[in-house]
Image (cartoon, rainbow, N blue to C red):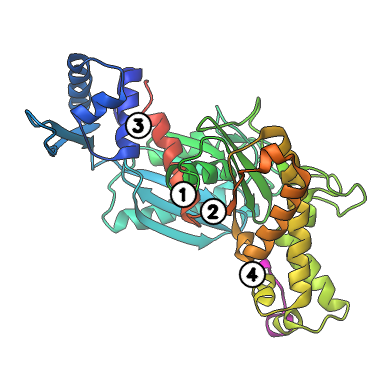
Amino acid sequence: MTARPANAHQARLLRLLRDGGPSSRVELGDLVELSRSKLAVEVDRLIATGLVVADGLAASRGGRRSHNIRLSPELRFLCVDIGATSVDVAVTNPELDVLGHLNQPIDVREGPVAVFEHVLGMAGKLKATGIAESFDGAGVGIPGPVRFPEGIPVAPPIMPGWDSFPVREALSQDLGCPVMVDNDVNLMALGEHHAGVARRVDDFLCVKIGTGIGCGIVVNGEVYRGASGSAGDIGHIQVDPDGHPCPCGNRGCLEAHFSGAALARDALAAVRAGHTGDLADRLAGTGTLTATDVAAAATAGDAVAIDLIRAGGHQVGQVVAKLVSFFNPGMVVVGGGVTGLGHGLLAAMRTEVYRRSPPLATGNLPIVLAELGPLAGVTGAACLITDRVFSPA
């Protein structure tokens, strides 16, 4: 098993090297409150553990040249982002560079055993490329509420068979390494904070719109999970008391009115009611409609598709406006599969947020699309597991 840092100073040094890459002892000394002699002791101890290696001489800053150090390039982390209909699996080095990445369709309703058979098979394929012999840790995201300390899903509405399944324990046994588990939108928020559009923002909301809708809440650079791990479950905020039934058992939830599945449902209903535009042509060609079809139809100018996207954006914007009034974030990041709908969705959301929230909260508030796409979740998974591995035992 990978060694762990012995104290908070070592953990701080490891995270600085993770986030900033190779650094000299002098540069690290500028960032941590340690004397030069104490810093040297802690760095030497980290080198002895194998977590850190020497990396040649640093650039001269006058006087005696300092030595660069970096995280061991041999470290490897498995990153898993499970969605409702697909899974992304990646391997990163300790500086969170993605070395290999696979995507595969799955149905999360098959249950945890079947889904993790797919995940382990994909991990094996990545190993076979030669980028990893084993893993020093694994981060996993799932599309439902997670009791974070134990890594256990709790009553996830779209995941039958997953309630209380010991994801963290089971995968740790299969992989032979530490495993951390979190909600998928929290990992997306971590990924965008580390390497995406929110990398310079410490207080922001990350709204993920896909098969479901969730919100990652980042406060002072840390994910806020709430008392029991369910913070940010905005998909089940009611937007219409007499609205559509939701898998959670209630009616009128945001997720029941605007998500990938809801968008496809409403598009299909429009065609069956007599709409004859691009959506009808797509249904005739394939026999089904998806959120991707709605996006493509909107791009082609289909009026119903455009109206569906605009209406959904207004509904999401109404909920986000309340969050902005309450939380006062520095940015709102919008990601997930449905963001293929693009700027029409974003424009509708912005209209609602800027109209409904106080000017003081929205005067300098960017509402932007996520940057990392399918790599956001796996990058966040790498952040999650390295946070654990690079923490004192």
Quadrant for the N terminus in the image: top left
Answer with left or right where residue 126 lies relative to residue 328: left
Element on which disc 4 rests = helix
How far apart marks 2 and 1 lie (CA) works out to 7 Å
Q: Name the residue under label 1.
A: 196
Element on which disc 1 rests = loop
Q: Mark 3 points at which residue?
A: 15
The answer to which of 199 and 237 lies nearer the viewer is 199
How far apart marks 3 and 4 lie (CA) works out to 39 Å
How far apart marks 1 and 3 lie (CA) works out to 18 Å
- Amino acid found under the numbered disc labelled 2: Ala
When the figure is inspected, residue 282 is found, relative to residue 68, above or below; the finding is below
Taking the image as drawn, is residue 4 in sight?
no
Element on which disc 2 rests = loop
Residue 349 image point, x, y percent: 71, 54
- First-in-chain label (1 vs 3): 3
Marker disc for residue 169: none
The answer to which of 120 and 60 lies nearer the viewer is 60
How far apart marks 4 and 1 lie (CA) works out to 24 Å
Q: Mark 4 points at which residue?
A: 292
Magenta highlight on residue 288? yes
Q: In which quarter of the view is residue 328 placed? A: top right
Q: Which contiguous range is marked in magenta? A: 283-292
- Judge the density around disc 3: few (<14), some (14-19), many (≥20) Cα neighbours within 10 Å: some
- Judge the density around disc 2: few (<14), some (14-19), many (≥20) Cα neighbours within 10 Å: many
Q: Name the residue under label 2.
A: 370
Answer with left or right where residue 302 lies relative to residue 379: right
Farthest-out residue, right: 242
Taking the image as drawn, is residue 213 in sight?
yes
The main secondary structure of the magenta stretch is helix
- Amino acid found under the numbered disc labelled 4: Thr
